[in-house]
Amino acid sequence: MNHLIHQAYEGEIYGIVFFSYFENVDDNDEQNKLWKALVEVETVTAELLLQHLLKQPQKYVFKTAELTAQGDDDAKKWIDLPWLELMQTLSQWVEPYEVKYRQWLQQCQLQDSQESRQLAPTFELIAEHETAIYHCLQAELTRAYAQAETQVATQVTTQVATQKSGLEYLSSFLNKYNQ
């Protein structure tokens, strides 16, 4: 099961680079808060997964340069998307990973072994971090739709202000795992 943890770790490296690109390029202060929080979630998760992997007897290859280039290249492809379209794209992109990581956790929990009991908290971390990101993106997408509707209909902007921010999901995850 450690190979799955290694796979998730590589995803964190990719995610750090990907979201860092947006954080460094986006000049919208509100959006930049989101990118910064996403980078922090990916970083905290990566650090915890790396701590686990380095304690294992097997040795892993860390393709940091390759993952960095891939994350950077992919971010450049999406940087010019309008906010609503970017949130739609990111939500659709993250959703299969959120499902996969929850399935990994369920598989780990269903196995009755000492190894699975020891690894369950790590798989919970992996699943919870991706769920936090997915819920964050869904909340931001909802807010983006509400803003678009508000702008088109010129309604009162209090409707947008009452929508839950995606940052709340990331903050909840960080409060649990960032020590």
Image (spheres, rainbow, N blue to C red):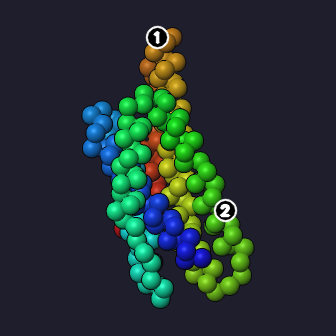
- Figure quadrant of the N terminus: bottom right
Residue 25 screen position, x and y as percent: 28, 39
Q: CA distance from mark 2 to mark 1?
A: 43 Å
Residue type for callout 1? Thr
Q: Which numbered marker is on residue 29?
A: none
Nearest-to-viewer mark from 2 and 1:
2
Residue 12's x, y, as percent? 43, 60
Label 1 Cα crowd, 10 Å radius (few <14 / some 14-19 / many 20+)? few
Is residue 47 positioned above or below 72 on the image? below
Task: Say which of 32 and 172 sits in front.
Answer: 32
Q: Residues within 10 Å of mark 2 (few under 14, many from 20)?
A: some
Q: What residue is drawn where x is 54% and y is 45%?
A: 93
Which element type, helix, strand or loop, lies under badge 2?
A: helix
Q: Nearer the viewer, residue 57 or 101?
A: 57
Residue at horizontal 48%, vertical 85%?
58
Q: Is residue 145 visible?
A: yes
In the depicted view, which residue is nearer to us: 158 or 93?
93
Which percent across, then down, holds residue 39?
A: 36, 53
Question: Which quarter of the rendered picture does the C terminus lie within?
Answer: bottom left
Circle 2 residue: 103
Residue at figure coordinates x 47%, y 60% from the top left? 11
Q: Amino acid at mark 2?
A: Gln
Circle 1 residue? 154
Q: Is residue 139 in sight in this rendering? A: no
Of residues 116 and 167, the one drawn nearer to the viewer in this rendering: 116
Q: Secondary structure at mark 1?
A: loop
Quarter where residue 128 is shown: bottom right
